[in-house]
Image: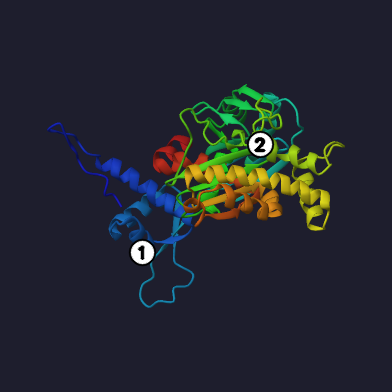
Amino acid sequence: MISDFHPRKDNQTMRAGPSQEDIRRHNLGALLRHVHLGGPTSRAELTSKMGLNRSTIMALTSDLTAAGLVREELPRETGRAGRPSLVVRPESSRVYVFAFDVGPDRLAVARVGLGGTILDRREAVRRRGPFELEELAGMLAGFARQMRRKTRADTVCVGAAAAVSGGVRKGDGVIRFGPNLQAEEIPFGEELGRRLGLGLPVSVGNDANLAALAEHSRGVGVAVRDLIYLHGDVGIGGGIIAGGHLLGGHEGYGGEVGHMVVNPGGRVCGCGSRGCLEAEVGERALLEAAGKLGGGQHGRDAVRAVVDAADRGDIVAQEALKRVGDWLGLGVANLVNIFNPEMVIFGGMLREIYLGSAAQVRSRMALHAMAPQRERLRLRTSALADDATLVGAAELAFAHVLADPLEVLARVTG
């Protein structure tokens, strides 16, 4: 629907409205977004969803088909009499982006086709320690080149983006702080883009923010306009969707809910403070409480082992989950009181921690969250699981294409 496009009268002066080309560009992006997020969609459905007439939809799909972004075909089954409406499908195998995920323990790269299809992927263990920019960027770019060599000659890469466990400055892809990556003031996007050699900028975002976008667009939070996604790795991060939009903050550092203080004077946090949610709920807190800290045990496998032990009746593991669940419930209650979300999603290692301590989390929330905010609240685990951050990075990489499909495609193929 293009109801926003009208000339305005301001201080008795008529301002020119958008040009026909502006409207066309907007509609092309909107149609491609419908197909990218919703999958194969008939022309008739697009006509209804976009509020445009059939001839306009036909012209838009023809432009996108000519550009190689979508294709049209007859539906496999109609079940209706009369001439069937053509189905518009994204060209997933031809148009793709590279998505990168850099976590404390994992490096992952995926080639993701238009429509969100993961076409190829590589993963490697990341050794905990200082963030070695050249080494990491070189390894990630090497994985991408391996995948690119396997593609057909007619394929085209239209973007690249990375999710990282840390605060990323909006605009230039610099990791300003990342205690769990041991990274500070790292020009990651610039270096990765140089190593890739595709002539494309590499967008960089916080992993929890991007996972929140992924769950909102493709996961358990589809159609939920107000949600909070909590991501657990070594630490705790968060992404907040309000009114359908990510709250990124003034400089892009919004959503650092892991550094909300829930226990003043509590455990020392990697950020230098005490009693942060991350310090009381993160991997180290759980493993220490369960008597599993040390001996080289860490990461999601170690967390899952504690949860499994609690399920089998291990009293120490159960008490550890109860303690961590107490602080997690308090943190969630604070967030619910402030943001009044419709849904809270637990991702990363917090999926396992929440499932093992759900009763304790709900008990704390009953005590500390205000009744109007919690009455219709839904608590869910991530539908995208360990792929949430990669999927979010892919969506960030596709954002430019969806904003101006033909211009981006002409630029990268010209």
Name the foreground residue: 309 vs 398.
309
From this view, report whether residue 230 is shown above or below residue 81.
above
Judged left or right of residue 286, residue 380 is left
Q: Position of residue 157 (x, y in %)?
A: 54, 40
Q: Is residue 92 visible?
A: no
- Residue at 59 percent of width and 23 percent of height: 187
Packing grade of label 2 (10 A; few <14, some 14-19, many >=20) is many
- Residue at 68 percent of width and 54 percent of height: 355
Q: Position of residue 251 (x, y in %)?
A: 48, 27
Helix, strand or loop at mark 1: helix
Which residue is at the far front?
367
- Residue at 45 percent of width and 49 percent of height: 68
Packing grade of label 1 (10 A; few <14, some 14-19, many >=20) is some
Residue bearing the label numbered 2: 278
In front of the other: label 2 or label 1?
2
Residue bearing the label numbered 1: 44
Name the foreground residue: 36 vs 251.
251
- Quarter of the rendering occupied by the C terminus: top left
How far is disc 2 from disc 1 in space, using C-alphas? 49 Å
Helix, strand or loop at mark 2: helix
From this view, report whether residue 34 is shown above or below residue 280.
below
Which numbered disc, 2 or 1, marks the residue that appears first in the sequence? 1
Q: Quadrant of residue 17?
A: top left
Which residue is at the far right?
295
From this view, report whether residue 304 is shown above or below residue 399.
below
Q: Position of residue 8 (x, y in %)?
A: 19, 39
Instruction: Give amino acid for label 2.
Output: Glu
Instruction: Give amino acid for label 1.
Output: Ala
